[in-house]
């Protein structure tokens, strides 16, 4: 008996190419409404094998963050920067970085951010101009 999954065509390379070259975030959505950026075979909320690829909204709110002082080699010249966890407006939670944030005083939980194209790898966010004073 074949076990069909709607996530089979989704690869890490396709996901990375999506945000680095195509300026879009990809994830998965279940019919129950659960949305995630993490590849999986089953919906962690309802347990069904109905996760389908979906384009995700590139705006959201900061759920958590940490200002990095000791980076990996790739980000050596960018410190300090904020490593952020973002709750996307259309559902799902994703991690990324904000090179414009240099100290904890410059960002707060709940700030609105948006996904932007970056010269570096990774998911790059900046403040959503609609939320700025």
Image (cartoon, grey):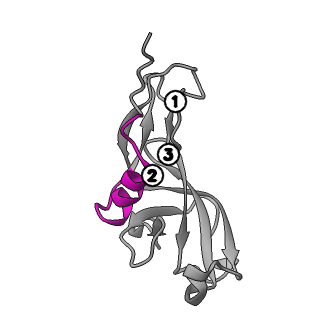
Q: Which mark is residue 12?
A: 2
Q: Residues within 10 Å of mark 1 (few under 14, many from 20)?
A: some
Q: Residues within 10 Å of mark 3 (few under 14, many from 20)?
A: many
Residue nearer the viewer, 112 or 102: 102
Question: Residue 7 sits in which quadrant?
Answer: top left
The answer to whether the residues at label 3 and label 1 have Cβ atoms under 8 Å apart is no
The residue most toward the top is 1
Vertically, is 35 above or below 42?
below
- From the viewer's perspective, is 23 left or right of 121? left
Residue nearer the viewer, 51 or 126: 51
Residue with the mark numbered 3 = 37
Q: Which mark is residue 112?
A: none
Magenta span contains residue 43: no
- Secondary structure at badge 1 equals loop
The answer to whether the residues at label 2 and label 3 have Cβ atoms under 8 Å apart is no
The percent coordinates of residue 61 (x first, y second) are: 53, 56
- From the viewer's perspective, is 36 left or right of 8? right
Q: Residues within 10 Å of mark 2 (few under 14, many from 20)?
A: few
Magenta span contains residue 17: yes
- From the viewer's perspective, is 24 left or right of 42? left
- Secondary structure at badge 3 equals loop
Which stretch did the figure color magenta? 8-25
Identify the residue shown where x is 68% and y is 77%: 68
The percent coordinates of residue 49 (x first, y second) are: 48, 21
């Amino acid at each position: 008996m074949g076990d069909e999954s709607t996530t089979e065509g989704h690869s890490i390379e396709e996901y990375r190419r999506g945000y680095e070259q195509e300026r879009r975030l990809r994830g998965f959505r279940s019919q129950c409404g659960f949305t995630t950026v993490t590849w999986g075979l089953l919906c962690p909320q309802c347990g069904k094998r109905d996760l389908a690829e979906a384009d995700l909204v590139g705006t959201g709110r900061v759920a958590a963050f940490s200002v990095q002082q000791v980076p990996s080699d790739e980000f050596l010249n960018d410190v300090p920067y904020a490593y952020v966890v973002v709750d996307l407006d259309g559902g799902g939670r994703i991690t990324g970085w904000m090179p414009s944030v240099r100290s904890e005083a410059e960002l707060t939980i709940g700030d609105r951010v948006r996904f932007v194209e970056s010269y570096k790898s990774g998911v790059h966010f900046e403040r959503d101009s609609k939320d700025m004073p």
